[in-house]
Image (cartoon, rainbow, N blue to C red):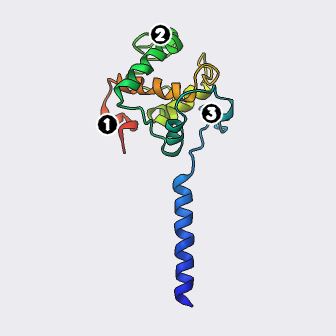
Amino acid sequence: MKKNKLLVVAAVSIALISTAALAEITFRNTITGVPLDMSVAKSGGNEAVFNQFKETGKNPYNGDKEAVQKGHDLFMPACSGCHGHEAEGKLGPGLADDYWTYPSAATDQGLFEVLFGGANGMMGPQYVNLSTDEMLLIMSWIRDIYKGDPKKAKWLKK
């Protein structure tokens, strides 16, 4: 009898752990904290990569040279008008250093939340202009040009 109870407890524990491991991250608006509605995002791109990101909060494109180039190509028309051609800052802040207007952007999840849902000032939500995959590509370029202290780069931590 004890053995059966132990097996049931073990099975339930494994099921709960498995479910937790597969749980998606809840993305939240940078300003309000309200969960972001992913259903309003522009369609297109690699859905499998975005699904992986939703589970881990780590951008699968980081370090992928082809993705970084695509991210740069997308950044130029979508972001450079405010952030500068090399993300040095213009109307919007620079994106290649240690300073983040929203400290959560030091993580891939936080940077995605700013891109998707917008922020204070002139940074509007980008889900109408960019697919979630395109946002991840742009993020990979931003991470690639980082010139700050690697110890402060939370997206590099495992």
Q: Position of residue 143 (x, y in %)?
A: 39, 27
Marks 2/1: CA–CA distance: 26 Å
The residue singled out by tag 1 in the image is 151
Q: Is residue 35 above or below residue 101?
A: below
Name the amino acid, label 3. Answer: Asn
- Location of the C terminus by quadrant is top left
Q: Position of residue 22 (x, y in %)?
A: 54, 52
Q: Nearer the viewer, residue 17 or 123?
A: 17
Report x, y in % for residue 89: 44, 13
Dots 1, 3 in contact, CB < 8 A: no
SS assignment at label 1: helix
Which image quarter holds the N terminus? bottom right
Circle number at residue 29: 3
Amino acid type shown at disc 1? Lys
Q: Where is mark 2, residue-wise? A: 90
| Residue located at (44% from left, 15% from top) | 73
3D distance between C-alphas at marks 3 and 2:
24 Å
Name the element at disc 2. loop
Q: Closer to the N terminus: mark 2 or mark 1?
A: 2
Q: Secondary structure at mark 3?
A: loop
What's under tag 2, amino acid-wise?
Lys
Q: Is residue 91 left or right of residue 126?
A: left
